[in-house]
Image (spheres, rainbow, N blue to C red):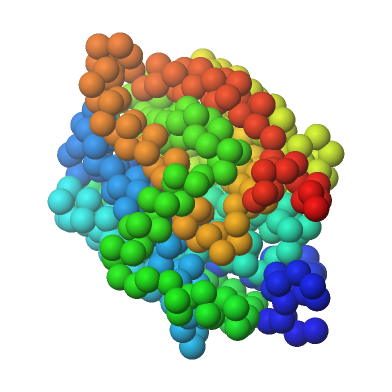
Amino acid sequence: MTPSTPAAGTGVPFKPRLSLTRILEMNLGFLGLQFSFGLQQGNMAPIYSYLGASEAQIPLLQLAGPMTGLLIQPLIGAMSDRTDSRWGRRTPYFLIGAVLCALGLFFMPLSSSLLMAVSLLWILDAGNNITMEPYRAYVSDRLDGAQHNVGFLTQSAFTGLAQMLAFLTPSILVWAGMNPDWVDGHNIPYTARVVFMIGAVLSFVTIVWSIRRVPELPLTPDERARIAAAPKGIGATLKEIGDAIRAMPLPMRKLALMSLFQWYAMMAYWNYVIYAIGRSVYGTADATSSGFHAAVLTNGEVAAFYNGVAFVAAFAMVPLARRIGAAPLHAICLVITGIGMIAMPHMTSKAMLFLPAIGIGLGWASMMGNPYVILAGSIPPERTGVYMGIFNMMIVIPMLIFGVTLPLFYQSWLGGDPRNVLTLCGVLMLLASLSVYSVRARNAQGLPLGAAPQA
């Protein structure tokens, strides 16, 4: 039996079990992709501040990520489901996204104005999102259902490792002798310039390595026939997205409310944690001060720490998810995360920040793995790409809502204090925990995972 033939009597393509080493190799590109996301999380708000943006403007300037995610991922998902090329179904999108991502990262720290930085962020996020959705679908394409846990939680582990390195690299450069206050003519530190250029190389090389070492499985004749018969064009693609939303599996619908609370909170945390640390630990709100530069580096070290926690926790969650279920495990992790976010604004020394960061790391590991475990088993294989793209809409829509709404009440309700934003984040995480606890993973036939269809 070859990888491209259906398993006997099922009509379902046979997917050979992969060793852990091969699963790590196939997800290595996710490390480069998440290094890029880590650089954005840790540096875009400061870069905007260096170029003259106010704190209240930051959410609006960050709309590129959720907007490109909303527009690109569902389209790329539906298109990649229908792609049959000499390079594969997902691979063309991996390569296009990798090139755009590398270009955006390389030029970002050279920005001379807010307009240039915002424009480059749109290019960078477009590249990230073109690559991200096929990478999620790639796991479902390449692994059988029994290996979905390890496949998606390996991506979660690489997310933790990559973002740990992305956040920690500026501090490593400072420890190696670079002056953190050494800035260019636009107030952007040279440490940011170096780390973004490292990211440009890393993101491209790791993605190419993955697709060369663990190529896609050949399409079966039935899959090729289905793709050939499918309507083509943007209209057909949009119709496919609409049809998939109407036929959305129940577990996926239930994840929508969780995503609203969870991702609004994460976007708010990423945008305002540096400003909160600047006030609570360094007593400054001045983006050009040495204290603010120290807050950026401190946040990088704290974020590296919680991503390190996520890297270890992701592997530990594999047997736990099998034992108690992905949804209850995720709910527990979100409670711990919420407590950590509520506690963080009250930490007044650098060392104290690492305690609540443990909780944030546990939640981050779970966010990047467990919801996808629930999702992957409940969607039909032929629609993996479009449903992964639609699920990303549940991530980016809360981020868009954040970008539009938080500036409206940042001064009036939150007193213009970023520490209050972190408290809000913690409360939202607790609400996310309540909303996901009752979700039960079901297969594409609506049965509990592991149950056989009725004859």
Query: Could you say which is closer to the camera, residue 360 or residue 254?
Result: 254
Spot occupied by residue 252 in the image (x, y as percentages of width and height): 56, 41
Q: Is 351 left or right of 13, judged from the image as shown?
A: left
In the orientation shown, which residue stands out farthest toward the front?
Answer: 455
Residue found at x 39% / y 34%: 398
- From this view, report whether residue 318 is shown above or below residue 260: below
- From this view, report whether residue 404 is shown above or below residue 368: above
Spot occupied by residue 412 in the image (x, y as percentages of width and height): 25, 11
Q: Is residue 91 shown to the viewer in this render? A: no
Spot occupied by residue 166 in the image (x, y as percentages of width and height): 50, 53
Q: Is 265 left or right of 362, judged from the image as shown?
A: left
Residue found at x 58% / y 24%: 435
Q: Is 48 left or right of 251, judged from the image as shown?
A: left
Q: Quadrant of residue 255?
A: top right
Spot occupied by residue 158 in the image (x, y as percentages of width and height): 62, 56
Where's the N terminus, which quadrant?
bottom right
Residue found at x 47% / y 57%: 386
Query: Could you say which is closer to the camera, residue 345 or residue 64?
Result: 64
Residue found at x 33% / y 17%: 417
Q: Quadrant of residue 209?
A: bottom right
Q: Is residue 219 shown to the viewer in this render? A: yes
Q: Is 408 left or right of 180, judged from the image as shown?
A: left
- From this view, report whether residue 353 is shown above or below residue 22: above
Query: Could you say which is closer to the camera, residue 247 or residue 372?
Result: 247
Q: Quadrant of residue 327?
A: top right
Query: Could you say which is closer to the camera, residue 77 or residue 368?
Result: 77
